[in-house]
Amino acid sequence: MNTNSALIVPAQSASPTQAAQLNFQDAAKPLIAISDPWLWVMWIIGILLLLAVAWFAWRYWNKKTELAKFVPPVPPHIRARRALEQALTLISEPKPFSILVSDTLRTYLEERFSFHAPDRTTEEFLYELQSTDLLTAEQKQSLADFLSVCDLIKFAKYEPTEVELRALHTAALRLVNETEPRFVPAEIQSTVAAEQSAIQNPQSAIEK
C-alpha cells in the first residue's frame, strides 16, 4: 500500500439554504437615507401659500375689472340739466325746442316724484299735481303755466319770441334746481333741529 498518495476529498456542494444566503448577501445594497420630514412640511406650506396668493390675486383682478365695468347711474336732475342745455341748440326752432324742454321736465318729475307725467295729457297731469304736497303752490302754478305755453306752441301753432322760449327754459331749469335732492350733513340737520325746537319751545331753551 502506497502511503505517500494524497488523500483527495471531494468538494461538498453548498446546500440550497446556504446558496440563497450567499445570493441575498451579494444582491444586498446600502439603504437610502430618509430625508428630514420637516423638509416635506415646508414644501407643502410653500405650495399652499403660493396657491393662496394666486387665489387672492385672481379675486383682486376680478373685482378691479368689475369696478371698471360698473358705471354709476346719472341722477335725474343731472340728466335733466344736460337735456335742457342741449335744448338751447334748438332755440331758433320753437316747436322742437318746446317739445324737448317739456318732455325733459315731465321725465324728470316722473323719475323724481314717481309721477306718470309722460303718459298723461297736460290736464290729467295738472289734476294729479294738485293733490300732491311734493311741490309748493308757487311751483305748481309755475309748472301749469309752463306746460300751457308748451302746448300752445306744439298744438296751436303759436309762434313765440326767443325771449319767451328762454323764459320757458329758465322756468324748467329753476324747477329742476328747486326740487333736486338735498344731501344735508348730519351735523347741520341736528343744529337745524335744535334751532327749530328752541323756536317752538322758547321757555325750555331759556331754562337750559
Image (tube, rainbow, N blue to C red):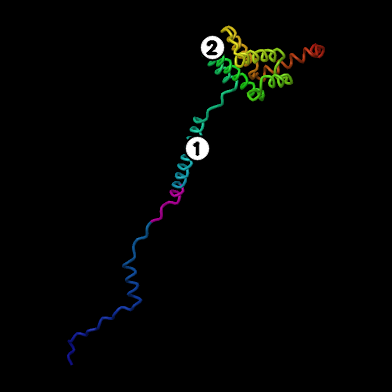
The disc labelled 1 sits on which kind of residue? Answer: Arg
Above or below, comparing residue 1 to residue 178 in the picture: below
Residue 150 appears in which quarter of the rendering? Answer: top right
- Residue at left offset 19%, top offset 85%: 6
The answer to whether 63 appears left or right of 111 in the picture is left
- Residue at left offset 31%, top offset 67%: 26
Q: Residue 68 appears at what percent x and percent y?
A: 49, 30
Q: CA distance from mark 1 to mark 2?
A: 52 Å
Residue 72: mark: none
What residue is disc 2 on? 91
Magenta stretch: includes residue 36: yes
Element marked by disc 2: loop
The stretch in magenta equals 33-41
Residue found at the very far bottom of the displayed protein? 1
Q: Residues within 10 Å of mark 2 (few under 14, many from 20)?
A: some
Element marked by disc 1: helix
The answer to whether 28 appears left or right of 42 in the picture is left
What residue is disc 1 on? 59
The disc labelled 2 sits on which kind of residue? Answer: Ile
Q: Residue 126 appears at what percent x and percent y?
A: 70, 19
Quadrant into which the N terminus falls: bottom left
Q: Residue 97 appears at what percent x and percent y?
A: 56, 15
